[in-house]
Image: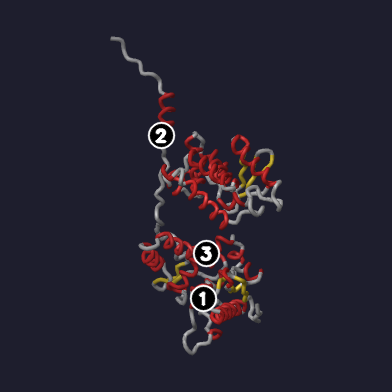
Amino acid sequence: MARIAIRYFVERPGRGGGVRRFWQPGCGLRAAGWRSTRLADDRAAAIAQAEAINAAVDRWRRGQPPSPPPEHRALVARTAPPGLDDGDVPPPRPDSLKALIHRYRHSDDFRELRASTRRAYEDNLRSLDRWAGDAPLEVLTPERFVALWKSMRAETPTKAKGVVTMARILFGWARRSGLYAGYRQGGALIPENPATRLNIRGPKPRRCEADLWTPEEIAIFAAVAEHLGRLSVGVAVELNAWVGQREGDLLALTIGQYRDGEIVLRQSKTGARVFLPVNLVPELGDRLAALDAGRLQSRVAPTSLIYNERTGRPWTTHSFRHAFDDIRAEAARWCPSLAARQFMLLRHTAIVRLAEAGSTAEEISAISGHTLQSVNQILERYLVRTRKMASAALRRRVAMASPVRTPPP
């Protein structure tokens, strides 16, 4: 296949003898947030798209914001206005929202975020840029942010709250960095963050007892997973039903974090360190031992506690979710209620089952890594006041009550 002297332009064989074309950035660009992009099937169009992205990269390296921003699929679909060369796009005015977004994207604070957090932030930053990118900062008052939220909430309530929250984070960073002193209203300088204390709310999660995994569903899912040669996915479900961790933290566990029947984990989102004595749950120890036995038969020596049996390597979030979906679809043939089950709700299930067993908020937080306030908020937010908890409360009340003595006739 002929090589073309275009930076980051890659051609690969596709199915059926076809060719797939990509814009594939190097390590430095990927670390800065640029990502691989599938280009058009037509070769000439793909080359034009790659050159458009490279032009945006060059502007970014010169300290100018890419125009359009590096949302590659949108970028390659757009064309410059007639008579305006792509390299002649003027830089934004220094006091505009677009310029502030550009500075934040290239700050250490943004680059040090987790990759998944950066992706979510990028999506919301693009929404802010489309909304008022050229507007000067001083006109972006709280009333305007409330109006933005109201304009979005009817169709995308979660997205609406996320965009305004991103604005609060953006202006908070600008204040800490000395880039934004405040906004003017009625001729007076208002030093507060204009996107804070807006009294807006996201959609309230409607959770109930029916959303939680039952022990029977967990057992059926694990059995089907093992039957399909995906023991590790079943182990992940069983383990998380007891310890309630985030999916990413669970998949990132290494062999060294499991010693003498205890898992020691530092949560990536909060930095909280938790100690999980899984040896107290006999079936968990047995399942982890079975997974460990398969480690010896793998061609690649797995270093992850929960690893992909077919590759011997750690699960990626993408591949794990695909495997989970496949197992769930098969398991739903035997247990239809499993069709609606989500892996993320295993974290909620673990917290609620601990509460049903009479665990205190302090004991639950020691396992889940939540603050005490968050434990109580979770139980309240998901409305998981279950029948078992109500029955346990009344039994304790009856046990404490003194028998009523009736006077003799």
Circle 3 sits on which residue?
121
- Say what secondary structure mark 2 lies in: helix
Identity, as a three-letter code, of the amino acid under mark 3: Tyr
Camera sees residue 377: no
- Relative depth, front residue between 134 and 141: 134
- Of labels 2 and 3, earlier in sequence is 3
Question: Which numbered circle lies on residue 75?
Answer: 1
Label 1 to label 3: alpha-carbon separation:
18 Å
Residue 35 is left or right of residue 302, and the answer is: left
Identity, as a three-letter code, of the amino acid under mark 1: Leu
**Residue 255: percent from left, percent from top:** 68, 47
Q: Nearer the viewer, mark 1 or mark 2?
A: 1
- Vertical side of 166 occupied by 241: above or below: above
Label 2 to label 3: alpha-carbon separation:
41 Å
Q: Residue lying furthest bottom in this view?
A: 83
- Of labels 1 and 2, earlier in sequence is 1
- Relative depth, front residue between 140 and 114: 114
Q: Nearer the viewer, mark 1 or mark 3?
A: 1
